[in-house]
């Protein structure tokens, strides 16, 4: 631990705002030793990712490093040439992004993308492929000798995230920056990825900066924790000290977040708005859903939970008509919907809208907010001119964004939480009765998550909306759900009212999900893995 790998002193980073430059990072210091993991914690906009990228000597477009020192193993990254920094990146310094789906090239197989940097560095292609399979095995990917020959869209999100971690390890780097690497993963997959990351970092004595908003996750991974707020360091301490006795009031507020929970509603007495009946669906010749049935009632929230690949999003595709089922039907307000969306009426399409997981990829970056929100209102309701402008402003106010301030902004000018609010407004523009929320809070920090959940709850009460909430976050389920459906391998394992689902006894798979929710205890992951190893 005495061997210092990275030193950052009085770092200042600015972002362009018109003709001005505004501070993003305001004089932060950082020291990292070989083999050490530093956890960076803070809400959206705190500067976590900006600081992580600066450890590579890199600043995003529209940003500049305006002051301070960045020393990586004796190399001054502020004054090094671009060629020298490029030679370090991917070789001695690696980066694992939050969204693997947006980071991989969809036109190339996983193993081709893994092999690119090692081959450029002089390694034989055959050796690169063998090392890829070894790392896939270490990352506990299924069929490690074969999975690399698939395209990114042919593997699950959790598998893709592990493949990206393996790719980052291709050259055995001295430093890896993990930028929210498990945020979008279900709890069971998250356990596998966390264990694999921890083992591989230790095996290779790699230093890491682990950026996350999940305090329970960072407790399992980090030796030390640094808290950021609006580009400034709040406090720093070893993990056990930080968890047991945080000093700053802001840190204490992070520890206490996620207090929101809807009151338990009485059982519904009305007929369901949506009924999914005995649905079987497939991609190609492979069955994905097997005899899936459940109901969704107006003014209520059904949470659909399960691990990556369990069929949650596939059910949403069936309901929206994007994937016609082989068997079964979807009934909406007593009317059987055509299986294919192309056969549905415009009003049938209007009644069901979706809010997507990754607002970054769901919003067209070239369109301003008035166009993004206005298009559904124009398409489904025929609004034009002043009526359309008034509706767009009304929707912005409904999602708690000032219309005059935001209506002409581009998505790139918004925070992650604001982008997700625009996704909500766009869904509301069609005046639907059912909204499918597909992991809408998984990419957000815990403070922003709570704000989004409160917003969705308020809109549901005011508009009597039905929600189907696809999520892997059981704390979100506890906060917002009325009923819960648990899925595994395309089947409904268990379903019922939320209070019954969280009270024992549980089905074995439900018990596995509940036991996989990380706790604010640095020993939790090790104890869980030891207990499961003992059972097997």
Image (tube, rainbow, N blue to C red):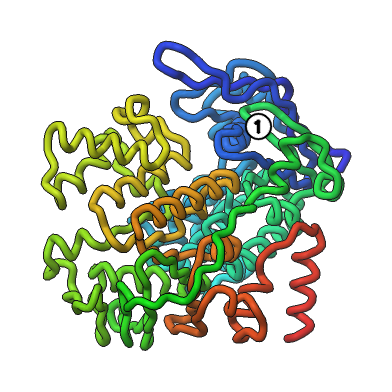
Is residue 132 visible to us here? no
- At x 75%, y 42%, the residue is 252
On the image, the x and y values in percent for residue 532 come to: 74, 79
Q: Quadrant of residue 226?
A: top right
Left or right of 478, for residue 175? right
On the image, the x and y values in percent for residue 84 come to: 58, 29
Residue 354 or 480: which is nearer the viewer?
480
On the image, the x and y values in percent for residue 327 come to: 26, 87
- At x 42%, y 81%, the residue is 490
Residue 389 higher or lower than 313, as above or below: above
Q: Which residue is mark 1?
A: 229
Left or right of 97, for residue 322? left
Left or right of 507, for residue 292? left
Q: Quadrant of residue 384?
A: top left
Marks counted in the figure total 1
Residue 334 or 384: which is nearer the viewer?
334
Q: Quadrant of the C terminus?
A: bottom right
Residue 347 higher or lower than 258, as above or below: below
Mark 1 element type = strand
Q: Quadrant of the N terminus?
A: top right
- At x 35%, y 73%, the residue is 315
Mark 1 Cα-neighbour bin, 10 Å: few <14, some 14–19, many ≥20: some
Q: Quadrant of residue 202?
A: bottom right
């Amino acid at each position: 631990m005495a061997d210092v790998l990275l030193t950052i002193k009085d770092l200042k980073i600015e972002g362009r705002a018109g003709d001005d430059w505004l501070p993003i990072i305001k004089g932060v210091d950082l020291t990292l030793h070989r083999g050490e993991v530093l956890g960076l914690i803070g809400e959206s906009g705190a500067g976590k990712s900006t600081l992580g990228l600066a450890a590579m000597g890199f600043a995003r477009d529209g940003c500049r490093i305006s002051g301070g020192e960045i020393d990586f193993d004796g190399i001054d990254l502020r004054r090094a040439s671009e060629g020298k920094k490029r030679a370090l990146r991917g070789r001695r310094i690696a980066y694992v992004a939050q969204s693997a789906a947006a980071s991989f090239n969809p036109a190339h197989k996983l193993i081709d993308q893994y092999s690119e940097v090692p081959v450029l560095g002089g390694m034989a292609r055959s050796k690169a492929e063998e090392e890829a399979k070894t790392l896939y095995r270490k990352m506990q990917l299924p069929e490690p000798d074969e999975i690399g020959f698939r395209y990114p869209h042919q593997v699950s999100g959790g598998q893709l995230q592990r493949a990206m971690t393996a790719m980052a390890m291709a050259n055995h780097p001295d430093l890896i920056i993990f930028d929210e690497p498990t945020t979008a993963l279900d709890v069971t997959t998250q356990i596998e990825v966390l264990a694999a990351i921890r083992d591989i970092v230790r095996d290779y004595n790699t230093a890491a900066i682990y950026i996350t908003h999940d305090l329970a996750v960072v407790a399992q991974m980090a030796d030390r924790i640094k808290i950021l707020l609006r580009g400034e360091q709040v406090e720093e301490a070893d993990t056990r000290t930080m968890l047991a006795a945080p000093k700053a009031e802001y840190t204490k507020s992070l520890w206490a977040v996620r207090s929101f929970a809807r009151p338990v509603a009485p059982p519904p007495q009305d007929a369901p708005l949506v009924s999914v009946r005995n649905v079987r669906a497939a991609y190609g010749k492979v069955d994905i859903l097997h005899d899936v049935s459940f109901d969704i009632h107006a003014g209520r929230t059904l949470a659909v939970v399960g691990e990556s690949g369990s069929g949650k999003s596939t059910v949403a595709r069936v309901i929206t008509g994007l994937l016609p089922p082989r068997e079964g039907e979807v009934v909406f307000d007593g009317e059987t919907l055509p299986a294919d969306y192309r056969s549905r009426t415009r009003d049938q399409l209007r009644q069901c809208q979706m809010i997507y997981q990754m607002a970054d990829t769901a919003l067209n970056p070239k369109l301003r907010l008035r166009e993004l929100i206005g298009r559904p209102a124009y398409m489904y309701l025929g609004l034009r001119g002043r009526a359309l402008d008034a509706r767009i402003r009304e929707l912005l106010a409904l999602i708690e964004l000032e219309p005059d301030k935001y209506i002409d902004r581009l998505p790139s000018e918004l925070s992650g939480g604001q982008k997700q609010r625009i996704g909500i407004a766009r869904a509301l523009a069609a005046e639907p009765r059912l909204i499918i929320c597909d992991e809408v809070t998984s990419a957000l920090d815990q403070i922003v998550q709570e704000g989004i959940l409160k917003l969705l709850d308020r809109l549901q009460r005011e508009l009597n909306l039905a929600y189907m909430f696809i999520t892997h976050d059981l704390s979100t389920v506890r906060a917002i759900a009325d009923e819960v459906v648990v899925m595994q391998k395309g089947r409904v394992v268990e379903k019922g009212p939320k209070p019954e689902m969280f009270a024992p006894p549980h089905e074995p798979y439900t018990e596995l999900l509940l036991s996989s929710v990380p706790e604010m205890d640095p020993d939790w992951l090790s104890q869980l893995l030891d207990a499961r190893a003992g059972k097997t």
